[in-house]
C-alpha cells in the first residue's frame, strides 16, 4: 500500500510541476494521470505492484467526496444565484460523457468483432 501511495503522489507531483512550469491550462492531477497511464503502458510490471492497493483505494473512494460536498455546502450563498448554470453544466457534461463513452464502446466492440471473425489478421496485428 505504501508503494502505491508513493507512486500516486509522485505522479501527482510530477503533473503539478509540469503544469506550473509549462503554463498549460491543464490541471496538474490530470497531467499526473496521463503520465501514470503512459508509464503503466510502457512498464506493465508496475501495474502488478500497485493493482491490489489501488483496488483498496477505489473501494474507499466515496470518502474523497466528503471535502467537496462540505465545500459546496459552505459556499451555498455564492452558488445559490448560479443554480441554473450549475444544473445545465452538470446535465450537458453528463450527456456528453455518456455519448462519448457509448461511441468508444461501439468502436471497441466493432474492432473486437472483426478480430473474432478474422483470427489470422488479429494474430498478425499482435506480432
Image (cartoon, helix red, strand yellow):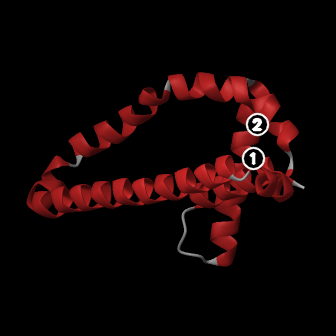
For this view, does 59 lie left or right of residue 18?
left
- Residue 31, x across and y down, in percent: 63, 61
Tell me the quadrant of the picture where the N terminus can be found: top right
Q: Are marks 1 and 2 in contact (CB under 8 Å)?
A: yes
Residue 103 has which mark? none
Q: Is residue 12 visible?
A: no
- Quarter-of-image position of residue 55: top right
- Nearer to the camera, 42 or 57: 42
Residue at the outermost bottom position? 23
Residue 6 has which mark? 2
User: Image height check: is 19 above or below 39?
Assistant: below
- Residue 12, x across and y down, in percent: 66, 50
CA–CA distance between discs 1 and 2? 6 Å
Residue that appears at 12% across and 57% down:
83
Residue that appears at 55% across and 29% down:
58
Residue 10 has which mark? 1
Q: Residues within 10 Å of mark 1 (few under 14, many from 20)?
A: some
Amino acid at each position: 500500500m505504501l508503494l502505491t501511495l508513493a507512486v500516486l503522489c509522485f505522479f501527482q507531483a510530477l503533473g503539478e510541476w509540469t503544469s506550473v512550469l509549462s503554463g498549460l491550462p491543464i490541471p496538474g492531477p490530470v497531467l499526473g494521470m496521463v503520465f501514470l497511464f503512459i508509464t503503466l503502458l510502457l512498464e506493465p510490471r508496475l501495474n502488478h505492484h500497485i493493482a491490489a492497493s489501488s483496488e483498496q483505494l477505489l473501494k474507499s473512494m466515496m470518502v474523497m467526496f466528503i471535502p467537496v460536498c462540505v465545500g459546496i455546502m459552505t459556499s451555498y450563498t455564492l452558488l445559490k444565484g448560479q443554480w441554473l448554470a450549475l444544473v445545465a453544466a452538470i446535465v450537458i457534461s453528463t450527456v456528453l460523457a455518456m455519448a462519448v463513452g457509448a461511441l468508444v464502446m461501439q468502436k471497441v466492440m466493432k474492432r473486437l468483432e472483426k478480430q473474432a471473425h478474422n483470427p489470422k489478421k488479429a494474430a498478425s496485428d499482435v506480432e
